[in-house]
Each structure stands twice: as C-alpha cells, then as structure tokens.
C-alpha cells in the first residue's frame, strides 16, 4: 500500500538537504524530526554532483551513507531526480543545454533551472543520471516515492534556445503537416509573415512595437507545455522500470505554460503543490488593503491543484519567513499562522503536508528562506508549533481520503489561459472577474472548485449546480456541445462578455457574436466597447437590483429563445440588454455583457442560489474561511480564522471537535489565526 495519500491517515514531512550539513548531524536531525511528528523527508533534488561529480563517473557513496542512517530509523524518503540543476562540467562542455532570453543570449551557470527541455544532449544526460539513480537507489526500503525535477517552469516558463527553435519546427510540422496549413492558421498574410520553409520559423523573438504574431504565440505556449511534459515523461518512464510496486511518482509546484492535468495523467501518480501563503506579505509588494484576501488567497491555488489531482499533497509548505538574497522578503509567520496554513492545505484536500525546510540554509541564494529551525538549530517557537500540529493531525486522521465539497465551479481551459498572455483585451477583462468571483465566494462562504475544459467530461460537469466561465474567448464546437448537454440536463451556466469570438487558432470568427455560444445563450451582440474612462459608473439593473458593470460592455439582443433579465441603466446604452437568460431542457444559461467586481459576483452567486450552501450548518464571520470535506455521509467542517483577533462562529448542528473529542454546538470562539475541524453528526 502506498505510504502517503492512501486514504487512511494524514502524514507530515519536511525537505532535508544532507549535502548542506556535516554527517555527524544527520542522525540527530532525523531523530528530532521523528520526535516532532515528521515521517517523510524529501532529498536530492539539487544534488547531481553528489552522484556524478565528473562526466560519466558515478559514485553512490554519499546518499548510500545517508540512506543507511535513515534505515536505522522509521523515517521514509522521497528521492528526487536532480535535473533542475545541471552541474558545472555539463554546462561548460555542452553550453547548448542552457536556456536563452528572448534575444537568444544564453543564461549562465550559477542559478537553477537554467537549462532548456529540448537540448538533445541534455535529454541524454538527464536520462542517464535518472537511470543510474533509480537503478541504484530504488530498491531501498526507506524510499517510498520519487519526485521529478523540481518545480517545472519555475523561474522561467519561456524558452528561446536554438534547441527550442528546432524542436518548435518539429512540433509545428507534426501539428499542421504543411506550411500552407500553418500559414492559414497563423494568418501570416497579415504584415507579410508568410513562411515558405520550415527553417524560417523560430520561437518568438523580440519585435518592434507589438508582440509577436498572437497565433504563433498561442502555439508557442502549447509547445512549451508539450516540451515540459515530454521531459517529465522521459524521467517517469525510466523510474517506473525500477521503482517498487507501491512507490509513487510525483512532482511539485504549479507554474505557467504547462498543462499540469495532462502531465499528471501521463507521468504522475498524483500532484503536489508548493504552498507559500506568506508571499501575500512580501514587504516590497504588500499593501494593507481592506479588500485584500492576503494569505487566504492561496486557497484559490489549492483549489486549482485539486482540479489537477483530487488526491494531492503539499511538497513545500510555508514554515518560516521567506526571502532570497535578491528579494521576496517577508515577515516570520506569527504564532498560529503555520498551523493555519497547514489546515488551509488540508481543508482543501491535501492528505500529505511537507514543510520547507527542516533547517534554514547557511549558504547560497536562499539563506533568508527560513525553515522550521533557524541557523543554530536551537529549540524555537516554530518547532513547538510543529509538535502541536502533529497532535492535531493525529486527532483528525479520519478525514484522510475525504473529498472537498463544492456545488459551484469556475471554468477555464489552457488555451484561454495561454491566449490571454498575448491578448491585452482578454487579460484586462478576465483577471478582475476571476479575482472578483473568488473573493465573493470566500466572503460568502461558497466553496468553489476549478474545472478545466478539455480535462472534464459531462459526468464531471454534472457534479455542480452552477458553472461560471467568466470570459470564454476561445470556443470550440466540442466545448459548446459539452456545455449545451450540461445545461440541458439541469445545470446552470453563467458566461461573461467577450466570449465566443475566437477559434482554436486564436483567430477572430466572422459569425455574429458570441459565435458558437449564440444558440446556447440565446444572445446576439450587435455592438461592444470598453467602458469609456469618462463614462463614470455604468450600472446594470437585474430585477430591481442595481450593480456596477466593469471594464467592458457587450450590448446584447435576445435571439433564439433568449429572454432579457437585466439592462444597462447608464451611458449611451441605457435600456440595452446587459443580461440574457435562455432555458434549455432542464437547465438555463445566463450571458452577462460585462466583467465582474466583487459586489456583482456576490449578487450573481446569491440570485442563482449558489451562495452559502452550508448556511444550515454554520454561520461564519466574513474574516474566516469555511470548507467542507466529505467521505460518504460524513462531513468535516473546517473553519479557519485569518485575522489576528478572535472570531466567533455559530454551529447549528451538533458535532465533534476533532481536536478535543468534545461534542460542540452553538457559539464557538476561535483565537487569532485559530482553526477548528468538526465532524458533523
């Protein structure tokens, strides 16, 4: 049986770097970890030279010595492939492995993730170090799993080496077959960009004035994703040949220009995330704005991880102050915040939480990225808090294997995410709407899931009463058909402005907008505009409820069974439809002609019956997060207080406080940064 994420118990771990510490400290550290509740360590992700110090000369003694000591204890190990940091001999001899900036200038050795995925020689050398490591270490009884690389697409999620241009041409030729098809898809007739040979095509380069061809950019982001996925799969396939039957393969992070869903399906047993809520308090960016969700905003990221891997873990959980010697400095977590952020991860579905890191490094670029222990290793508040977390975890083990419960989901897909990077109109509309819905859902205690079209079928969509796709710029017939079936079978779908106006190449369609979505939404869009800066507030009335439109205005007209639900009440389009509903089968679709702010998002959630689905269980202050995990008929209520002051929530049903084992009901007080986990009877 798999040692973690097995549905039976919660497990704590930490990241440990034996290469950073004298060997006489190893056993003491391991014993101290175990006494604090740590059961798993992650090692070796940056230690290529400890196995292959010079090319082709392999020495396994260092990690053999460490693993020998580990196996004198009950500690378990996640062993990593070291490919995130190629050694100096490699980058010196084979400079083509290095990534480049957009001008084609190579990055230098000395950081991490300075390689590119497509260098043939780097692929060969990575395959060799992975195979040598797996063949030698995989049989170790202390090893329970493997992590691929470290944080794919972190630091940089764009690649501009000559190897990338060569691989990009292969990717495009396999996709399009002919240059004629590529030229048509990319619209290269515009500004005389027509290609007549494959070797004329490169990864995007710097151009004057405007960004590169947006259709090329969309394919380029797809290519970056495919490159990272291929790199991961090459390693995973090797490890599978050597790993013990119950050992798992995972990777960590969640970064841009990568289809993490597809990578997980191809190469992983589950996904792990690196959760650093303290980024919300970075000194160079933090502003104490009343509307900011601060560290609570990391729940959005955790929800997206859950869409990738319903059973997931945290490979790096914030434990100390973050910051490198180049920036990102933030304060030390306050008493209780380490517990709060741990329970935030668990509330959203994590059954494994591993802290970064056990000891704070005294060397290198992350000397200010603090772990559980400071430089001296002395007993400290964070270690005591870890011990308390372990006690709490031991009390709530029964929630392992339960699933986060949400009745509403936000839709997205990778093509629209990538298209947005090269489309300022899309970004300006989509970003505030997504932020607004998340904030409105948090403050109204409306648990949300995120669902990626392309990685979801009708059965998945039918789990939700309400689906919201804020701005579905690119639409395919397959997506339109899937959403139509969802609505016809009883679902409620909400779609916002600027939807349906691009095809899968990012080309604007010539049909009446919203294109393929028109039959589903019962909507025509005769005119549209950004809201003029001198227009003042543009307002919308929906059954007497008035709220402000944001950023953009589609001027709508009902067609094909659509009915007007709301109208603009200001500017030159006052009286023009702003919201159209169409009933289809047992369900209905709403097309809203603008973007959302938090108030309008809250109104939509309330009017559609999506807000506060657990109001019958508890009344929770706005400053606290409510989450529910469910296993069969058993529900587990999490209440997390993100404020420094005490908060009171009211439990309407009898439950068991899992921390204490006591029966509770009525008013319950949480201390500042306090948490509660209650099994509902």
Image (tube, rainbow, N blue to C red):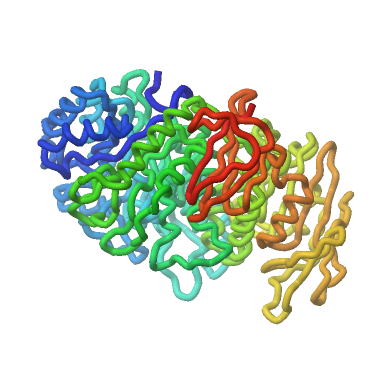
Task: Give residue 388's position: percent from left, percent from top.
Answer: 38, 37
Name the quadrant containing residue 633. top right
Along the horizontal axis of the image, is 552 left or right of 265?
right
Name the quadrant containing residue 268. top left
Along the horizontal axis of the image, is 392 left or right of 463?
left
Front residue of 617/253: it is 617
Tell me what residue is drawn at x 84 percent, y 41 percent.
Answer: 584
Tell me what residue is drawn at x 43 percent, y 32 percent.
Answer: 393
Query: Taking 410 as reference, is 428 above or below it?
Result: below
Task: Give residue 648's position: percent from left, percent from top.
Answer: 60, 48
Quadrant of the frame with the C terminus: top right
In this view, the residue farthest toward the bottom is 534
Tell me what residue is drawn at x 51 percent, y 28 percent.
Answer: 661
Along the horizontal axis of the image, is 74 left or right of 158?
left
Front residue of 148/13: it is 13
Front residue of 572/414: it is 572
Task: Give residue 675's position: percent from left, percent from top.
Answer: 50, 42
Along the horizontal axis of the image, is 581 left or right of 670?
right
């Amino acid at each position: 049986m798999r040692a973690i994420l097995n549905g039976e118990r919660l497990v704590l771990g930490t990241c440990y770097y034996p290469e950073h510490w004298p060997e006489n400290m190893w056993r003491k550290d391991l014993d101290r970890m175990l006494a604090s509740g740590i059961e798993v360590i992650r090692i070796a992700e940056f230690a290529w030279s400890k196995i292959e110090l010079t090319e082709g000369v392999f020495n396994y003694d260092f990690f053999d010595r460490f693993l020998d000591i580990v196996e004198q204890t009950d500690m378990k190990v996640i062993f990593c492939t070291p490919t995130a940091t190629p050694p100096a001999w490699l980058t010196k001899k084979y400079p083509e492995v290095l990534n480049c900036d957009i001008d084609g200038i190579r990055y230098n050795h000395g950081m991490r993730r300075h390689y590119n995925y497509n260098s043939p020689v780097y692929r060969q050398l990575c395959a060799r170090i992975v195979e040598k490591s797996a063949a030698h270490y995989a049989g170790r009884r202390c090893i329970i799993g493997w992590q691929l690389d470290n944080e794919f697409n972190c630091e940089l999620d764009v690649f501009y080496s000559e190897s990338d241009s060569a691989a990009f041409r292969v990717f495009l030729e396999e996709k399009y077959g002919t240059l004629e098809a590529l030229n048509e898809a990319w619209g290269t007739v515009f500004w005389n960009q027509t290609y007549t040979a494959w070797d004329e095509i490169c990864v995007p380069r710097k151009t004057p004035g405007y960004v590169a061809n947006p259709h090329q950019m969309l394919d380029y982001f797809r290519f970056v994703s495919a490159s990272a996925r291929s790199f991961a799969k090459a390693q995973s396939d090797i490890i599978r040949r050597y790993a013990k039957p119950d050992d798992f393969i995972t990777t960590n992070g969640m970064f841009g220009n990568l289809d993490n869903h597809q990578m997980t399906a191809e190469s992983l047993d589950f996904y792990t995330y690196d959760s650093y809520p303290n980024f919300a308090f970075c000194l160079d960016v933090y502003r104490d704005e009343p509307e900011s969700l601060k560290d609570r905003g990391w729940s959005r990221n955790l929800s997206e991880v859950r869409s990738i891997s319903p059973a997931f873990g945290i490979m790096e959980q914030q434990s100390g102050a973050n910051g490198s010697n180049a920036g990102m400095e933030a304060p030390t977590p306050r008493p209780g915040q380490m517990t709060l952020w741990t329970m935030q991860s668990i509330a959203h579905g994590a059954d494994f939480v591993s802290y970064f890191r056990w000891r704070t490094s005294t060397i290198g670029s992350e000397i200010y990225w603090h772990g559980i222990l400071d430089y001296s290793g002395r007993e400290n508040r964070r270690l005591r808090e870890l011990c308390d977390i372990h006690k709490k975890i031991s009390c709530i083990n029964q929630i392992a294997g339960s699933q986060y419960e949400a009745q509403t989901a936000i839709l997205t897909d990778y093509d629209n995410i990538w298209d947005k990077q090269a489309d300022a109109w899309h970004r300006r509309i989509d970003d505030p709407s997504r932020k607004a819905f998340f904030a409105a859902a948090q403050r109204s205690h409306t648990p949300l899931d995120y669902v990626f079209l392309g990685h979801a079928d009708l059965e998945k969509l039918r789990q939700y009463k309400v689906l919201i796709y804020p701005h579905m710029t690119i639409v395919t017939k397959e997506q339109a058909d899937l959403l139509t079936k969802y609505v016809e079978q009883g679902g409620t779908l909400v779609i916002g402005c600027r939807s349906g106006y691009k095809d899968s190449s990012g080309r604007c369609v010539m049909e009446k907008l919203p294109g393929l979505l028109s039959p589903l939404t019962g909507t025509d869009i005769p005119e549209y505009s950004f809201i003029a800066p001198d227009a003042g507030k543009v307002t919308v009335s929906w059954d007497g409820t008035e709220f402000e439109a944001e950023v953009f205005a589609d001027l709508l007209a009902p067609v094909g069974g659509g009915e007007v639900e709301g109208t603009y009440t200001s500017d030159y389009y006052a009286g023009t439809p702003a919201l159209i509903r169409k009933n289809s089968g047992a369900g209905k679709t709403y097309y809203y002609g603008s973007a959302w702010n938090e108030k309008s998002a809250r109104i939509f959630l309330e009017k559609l019956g999506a807000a506060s689905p657990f109001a019958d269980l508890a009344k929770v202050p706005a400053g606290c997060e409510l989450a529910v995990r469910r296993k069969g008929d058993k529900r587990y209520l999490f209440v997390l207080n993100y404020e420094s002051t005490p908060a009171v929530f009211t439990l309407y049903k009898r439950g068991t406080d899992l921390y204490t084992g006591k029966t509770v009901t009525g008013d319950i007080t949480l201390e500042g940064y306090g948490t509660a986990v209650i099994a509902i009877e």
